[in-house]
Image (spheres, rainbow, N blue to C red):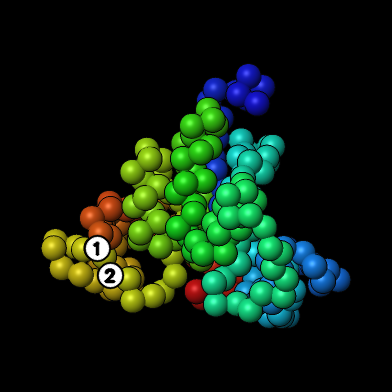
Amino acid sequence: MTRLTDKDRPKVLIIDDSAYDRNRSKKVELLARCFDHASLKMRFYKGFRMLTLGWSDGHTFLPIDFPCSVRKSLKLIAFLKISKNALAAINVERIRFSQPLNRLPDMIRRALANEVEASYVLMDSWFTLPPLVKAIVKQGLDVIGMVKKTKQRYLVNGKPVSLKQLYQLAQPVESKKGILRSIDTVMKNGTPVKIVFIQNRNKRSE
């Protein structure tokens, strides 16, 4: 793909998760009852959560890593007995006992080790958490993601401030349409970030 892509075109890795629905299945390995937080119906389903790491140059999207995950606390519907030394058994342990967010740095590391070229990692607010951002930045990639209004604090002149307080401290931006304010700051874990406040295109009061 690199030979087919203009060298000046930004190449990115995209992280997202989706519901892997297997409602009609009965004996699929590690089948579990999961909750679909992304669905408008906010439904429960039988299946898996599937993390996806994709590569894109703005025109083409290629999924390059897509492990399924099952929460350790979920009651499993099916669990087949296999040898502990089998590769399948090792994968089962990874799927069952590793947290999805903890697996993402390794997914990115594998992609870079296999000569996948990217300068940025794109993610939504569900993934944009300080530990994950720090782990990705350590691998030499910048992160672009939405930020939730949580208890997360940012350091300004050594003092922790909330996202709402950060908006008051940020300088207004007049030259770019849709961008209201921006400010350079640091997460409490020491990761430097730039917070950009934009207007909600669907609800301009937000």
- Residue drawn at the location 41% of the way across and 74% of the way down: 149
Q: Residue furthest left?
A: 158
Image coordinates of residue 56 in percent, x first then y, are: 62, 39
- The residue carrying mark 1 is 188
**156 or 120, which is in the foreground?**
120
Q: Are marks 1 and 2 in contact (CB under 8 Å)?
A: yes
- Determine whether 34 is above or below 157 in the image: below
Residue at the disc numbered 2: 153
Task: Identify the residue at image location x=54%, y=22%.
Answer: 7
Q: Is residue 150 above or below residue 92?
A: below
Q: Is residue 53 visible?
A: yes
- What crowding class fits label 2: few (fewer than 14 Cα within 10 Å), some (14-19), or many (20 or more)? some
Name the amino acid type tagged 1.
Lys
Of label 1 and label 2, which has the lower sequence position?
2
Q: Nearer the viewer, residue 62 or 105?
A: 105
Q: Is residue 188 left or right of residue 172?
A: left
Q: Reply above or below: 203 against 188.
A: below
